[in-house]
Image (cartoon, rainbow, N blue to C red):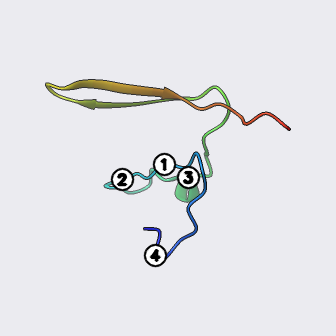
Amino acid sequence: MSQGETVHAGEFFGSGTVGNCCGFETGRFLDDGDVIELEVEPIGVLRNAVKRQSAV
């Protein structure tokens, strides 16, 4: 990924998205306070909240 794109601190990668589900297709993007969950049976759930970076 980093060979073809600039990777910035705090970014994450996702792959295997279902068609018509990406922000560019739907016009919906992650925002401060959103929660992302990834569940893999029987491992469990990985849950992360999106936090807006504070101005310095």
Q: Is residue 43 left or right of residue 39?
A: left
Q: Amino acid at mark 4?
A: Gln
Q: Earlier in the sequence, mark 3 or mark 4?
A: 4
Closer to us: mark 2 or mark 1? 1
State the residue position of label 3.
23
Q: Residues within 10 Å of mark 3 (few under 14, many from 20)?
A: few
Quadrant position of residue 51: top right
Helix or strand or loop: what does disc 4 sit on? loop
Quadrant position of residue 19: bottom left
Q: Is residue 31 above or below residue 3?
A: above
Q: Is residue 43 left or right of residue 32?
A: left
**x 86%, y 38%: residue:** 56
State the residue position of label 2.
17
- Which quarter of the figure is the N terminus placed in? bottom left
State the residue position of label 4.
3
Closer to us: mark 1 or mark 4? 4
State the residue position of label 1.
12
